[in-house]
Amino acid sequence: MTARCFRLLDPENEHDYVWADSAYSGECFEELLSLGGFESLIHEKGARNHPLSEAAKELNRVKPAIRACVEHVFGAMTMSIGGKLTRKIGLERTEARWGLKNLAFNFLRYLQCTSSLAEVA
């Protein structure tokens, strides 16, 4: 499983941060990320008789706010723009479909942002 997760990490990314749920916490993942030159911002989890420190609890409050910005996009696409499943033949058709889905989402998001600005003004 760790090799499959490592393929998702792109060393040419703009930032070297990795955001993940507490299911990916542990020494194995931390070692893997440090070998790849990534900084871990993985949620920490406590265990029985080993509660989280106050600093760890505060960090766990900050991390979901950033992850939610990304997860809401995928949730909106799943619920309203036809889901994540793509049944197309060929990479070009698949890329075109996802490009149109992204464009539609961006238009909808733009309309939401501009209409709320018009109501305020």
Image (cartoon, rainbow, N blue to C red):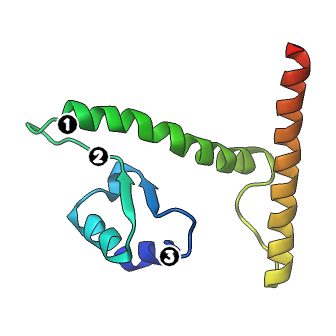
Q: Which callout, 1 or 2, points at the residue further toward the start of the chain? A: 2
Relative side of 89 to 71, left or right: right
Please give the residue where the numbered disc 2 appears in the rendered image: 44
Amino acid found under the numbered disc labelled 3: Pro
Q: Nearer the viewer, residue 87 or 108?
A: 108
Please give the residue where the numbered disc 1 appears in the rendered image: 52
In this rendering, which labeled residue sits more in front, label 3 or label 2?
3
**Callout 3: few (<14), some (14-19), or many (20+) C-alpha neighbours within 10 Å?**
few
At x 45%, y 59%, the residue is 17
- What's the CA distance linking mark 1 and mark 2? 8 Å
Q: Quadrant of residue 91?
A: bottom right
Amino acid found under the numbered disc labelled 1: Leu
- What's the CA distance linking mark 3 and mark 2? 24 Å
Q: Which callout, 3 or 2, points at the residue further toward the start of the chain? A: 3
**Residue 81 in the image, given as x and y percentages of width and height:** 81, 50
Please give the residue where the numbered disc 3 appears in the rendered image: 11
At x 89%, y 35%, the residue is 111
**Callout 1: few (<14), some (14-19), or many (20+) C-alpha neighbours within 10 Å?**
some
- What's the CA distance linking mark 3 and mark 1? 31 Å
1 and 2 marks in contact (CB < 8 Å): yes
